[in-house]
């Protein structure tokens, strides 16, 4: 389980890291809103602990941008501001829970566990979007009832897009989770474009409506609407 901690106060961040690592969570700390925003777009986390008062982009801005982009990662807000408006605004903007600082660590852990239980996306075997269907176990994909003839890589790429349907998937995420490439700067863009194009020829071209869409400057999204 990977937890992203977006927290600018070094002391609090350190305490969170140590406490969570003791419970065997993998912890990544972002000391600013910008860094948190970058990491959430580039990597996958099971949970985000988000401080509201951050330098640069504040926590609420980070949160609303994430939700607008369709990321469903559970978010637990940490705030020293106990003003009720901030908490309400946070929940309105798509936070799943909040905790007011200072908090007792056992309470934080209980909330983290609850969110992870709820937020864990079931590893569904049957995936579908519109008339596109996929069986992740038999590794067969069909669209409009027609079997799609996909290579192993094309299948993995389509499966990843389908498991994140209606969410913008960045090139960094594809590099990491489909190509298993962890280095930040790899010359993968051309390879990725070739595979996406082949996938489009098989999944979209023979049909009326395109499901694979390019999000300029970011990556791709699989969805019904243009
Ligand atoms: Ca802060």
Image: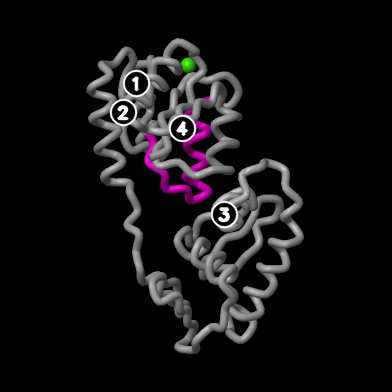
Q: Pointer 1: what residue?
A: 19
Task: Name which residue lies at 62% across and 65% down.
Answer: 213
Q: Which dot marks residue 23? A: 2
Q: Nearer the viewer, residue 143 or 84?
A: 143
Check if mark 2's residue and mark 1's residue have beta carbons within 8 Å. yes
Q: Is residue 88 above or below residue 159?
A: above
Farthest residue toward the top? Answer: 11
Circle 1: element type:
helix
Check if mark 2's residue and mark 4's residue have beta carbons within 8 Å. no
Answer with the quarter of the image where residue 163 lies: bottom left
Q: Is residue 145 above or below residue 192?
A: below
Circle 3: element type:
strand
Upstream in the sequence, badge 2 or badge 4? 4
Within 10 angstroms of label 4, few (less than 14), some, or many (20 or more) residues?
many
Q: Quadrant of the N terminus?
A: top left
Which residues fall within the magenta stretch? 58-75
Q: Pointer 4: what residue?
A: 4
How far apart are the alpha carbons under marks 1 and 3? 31 Å
Upstream in the sequence, badge 2 or badge 3? 2
Residue 161: % across, % down: 52, 62
Camera-nearest label, 2 or 4: 2
Camera-nearest label, 3 or 4: 4
Q: Pointer 3: what residue?
A: 169
Task: Name which residue lies at 39% across and 31% down.
Answer: 89
């Amino acid at each position: 389980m990977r937890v992203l901690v977006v927290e600018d106060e070094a002391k609090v961040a350190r305490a969170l890291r140590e406490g969570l690592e003791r419970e065997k969570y993998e912890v990544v700390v972002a000391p600013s809103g910008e860094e948190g925003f970058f990491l959430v777009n580039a990597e996958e986390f099971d949970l985000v602990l988000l401080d509201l008062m951050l330098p640069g982009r504040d926590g609420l801005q980070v949160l609303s941008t994430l939700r607008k982009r369709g990321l469903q990662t559970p978010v637990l807000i940490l705030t020293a501001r106990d003003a009720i408006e901030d908490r309400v605004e946070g929940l309105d903007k798509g936070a799943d829970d909040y905790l007011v600082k200072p908090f007792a660590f056992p309470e934080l852990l209980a909330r983290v566990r609850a969110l992870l239980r709820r937020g864990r996306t079931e590893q569904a075997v049957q995936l579908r979007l519109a008339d596109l269907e996929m069986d992740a176990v038999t590794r067969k994909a069909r669209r409009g009832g027609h079997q799609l003839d996909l290579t192993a890589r094309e299948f993995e790429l389509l499966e990843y897009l389908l498991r994140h349907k209606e969410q913008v998937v960045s090139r960094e995420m594809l590099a990491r989770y489909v190509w298993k490439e962890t280095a930040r700067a790899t010359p993968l863009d051309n390879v990725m474009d070739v595979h996406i194009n082949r996938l489009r020829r098989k999944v979209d071209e023979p049909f009326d409506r395109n499901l694979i869409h390019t999000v300029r400057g970011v990556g791709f999204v699989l969805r019904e609407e243009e």
